[in-house]
Amino acid sequence: MPHIHSFAPVGDGKATVLILGSMPGRESLRQHQYYAHPQNAFWKIMGELVGAHPSLPYAARLDALKSSGIALWDVLASCVRESSLDTHIRAETANDFAAFFARHPRITHVYFNGAKAEQSFRRFVLGKQELPALEFARLPSTSPAHAGMRYADKLQAWQAVTQF
């Protein structure tokens, strides 16, 4: 099984919100883009909320996030995974969040894109890295594997990222 690595964080010093995934899936790794799988609802949701429409070039989508005060990253720096499913993640190593938050001091809210991101953050980061006072919330996964929830309900839940 391949040992895979996440991407660099997206965001700037103006970010007030951080959205965390667990680890890029196969299609994202292939394209070297966050949430590149065409059935992942992330960019569709971000398009409706902050103008980061999936039809825009990737760089323009990232710019729309940044101009809305949103940073984007993954909890895990590396892992072993045999497929794109979060349940197949093994041998995890977390990213350096103490350094990240030192570079992004205005972030007050962290939103997890699904359960695995939250579980990994709580297991590998909380209590193990020095972090500022933050508010945490799990949002429904935008992954196509989380098809049990209607898109409209996901969109409504994800509106929380635009409140700060």
Image (cartoon, rainbow, N blue to C red):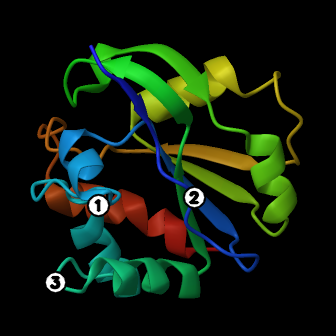
Asked whether the viewer can see residue 160, the reply is yes
Q: Which of the two labelled residues, at mark 1 and mark 2, occupies the earlier sequence position?
A: 2
Q: Please name the residue shown 16% across and 58% down the image.
A: 151
- Where is residue 139 shown, x and y percent of the image? 43, 47
Residue located beneath label 1 in the image: 42
Give the residue type that dot 1 points to. Phe
Residue located beneath label 2 in the image: 9
- Determine whether the residue tagged by mark 3 lies in a helix, strand or loop: loop
Give the residue type that dot 2 points to. Pro
**Quadrant of the rendered structure where residue 21 is?**
top left
- Determine whether the residue tagged by mark 1 lies in a helix, strand or loop: helix
Q: Please name the residue shown 57% across and 71% down the image.
A: 70
**Quadrant of the rendered structure where residue 53 is?**
bottom left
Q: Please name the residue shown 38% across and 18% down the image.
A: 80
Q: Please name the residue shown 15% across and 35% down the image.
A: 145
Residue located beneath label 3 in the image: 55
Direction from residue 96 to residue 110 in the image, left or right: left
Foreground label between 3 and 1: 3
| Depicted 118 relative to depicted 81: above or below | below
